[in-house]
Image (cartoon, rainbow, N blue to C red):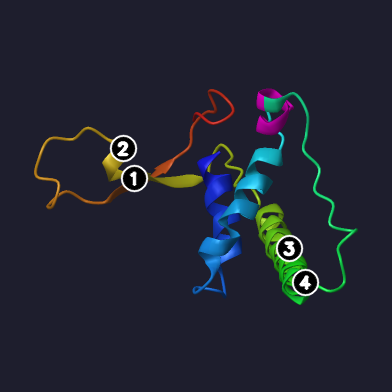
């Protein structure tokens, strides 16, 4: 969840370092409207019992500041959607590395309990040959 919040806030603040604080209520609404994976419901639905709707279709035409604000929000929403789509495409493009028996791998030193001064120990150990596969991620 924290990763999602970080990515969402990053997309709102990219390119506009001077007015991002004004957009926090909209980011909060977006976050609270997003369905959770486990509950399949948004925080709005769980806390309020319904999903609040935002409609700005019926706006008086003699209020230029509100028209500017709605235009700015629409532009921001479109930019954010573009950023999120590009992040999703880059995430989808990453392939999970498949290792096979016989491949050679390096072990990261920080995950091993080896006696000695951390500064002087190697960062990696290996290469080691994979002999057998024990589980989906264990070799």
Q: Give the mark nearer the N terminus: 1 vs 3.
A: 3
> Which sits in the foreground, 16 or 47?
47
> Which sits in the foreground, 81 or 47?
47
Q: Give the mark nearer the N terminus: 4 vs 1.
A: 4
What distance separates the C-alpha of mark 4 from that of mark 1?
51 Å
User: Residue 111 appears at what percent x and percent y?
Assistant: 31, 37
Q: Are marks 2 and 1 in contact (CB under 8 Å)?
A: yes
Residue wearing tag 2: 111
**Stretch in magenta:** 39-47
> Which sits in the foreground, 118 or 44?
44
What distance separates the C-alpha of mark 1 from that of mark 3?
42 Å
Residue wearing tag 3: 77
Residue wearing tag 4: 71
- 17 vs 58: above or below: below
> Which sits in the foreground, 38 or 25?
25
Verify whether residue 46 appears in magenta: yes
User: Residue 67 appears at what percent x and percent y?
Assistant: 79, 71
Residue wearing tag 1: 108
Q: Are marks 4 and 2 in contact (CB under 8 Å)?
A: no
What distance separates the C-alpha of mark 2 from that of mark 1?
6 Å
* Residue at horizontal 77 percent and vertical 38 percent from the top: 52
Residue at disc 1, secondary structure: strand
């Amino acid at each position: 969840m924290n990763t999602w919040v970080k990515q969402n806030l990053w997309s709102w603040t990219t390119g506009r370092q001077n007015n991002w604080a004004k957009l926090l209520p909209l980011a909060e609404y977006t976050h609270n409207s997003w369905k959770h994976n486990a509950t399949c419901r948004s925080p709005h639905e769980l806390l309020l019992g319904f999903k609040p709707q935002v409609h700005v279709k019926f706006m008086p035409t003699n209020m230029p500041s509100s028209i500017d604000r709605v235009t700015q929000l629409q532009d921001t929403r479109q930019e954010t959607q573009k950023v999120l789509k590009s992040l999703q495409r880059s995430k989808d493009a990453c392939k999970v590395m498949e290792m096979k028996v016989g491949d050679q791998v390096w072990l990261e030193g920080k995950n091993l309990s080896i006696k000695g001064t951390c500064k002087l120990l190697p960062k990696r150990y290996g290469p080691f040959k994979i002999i057998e596969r024990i589980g989906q991620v264990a070799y």
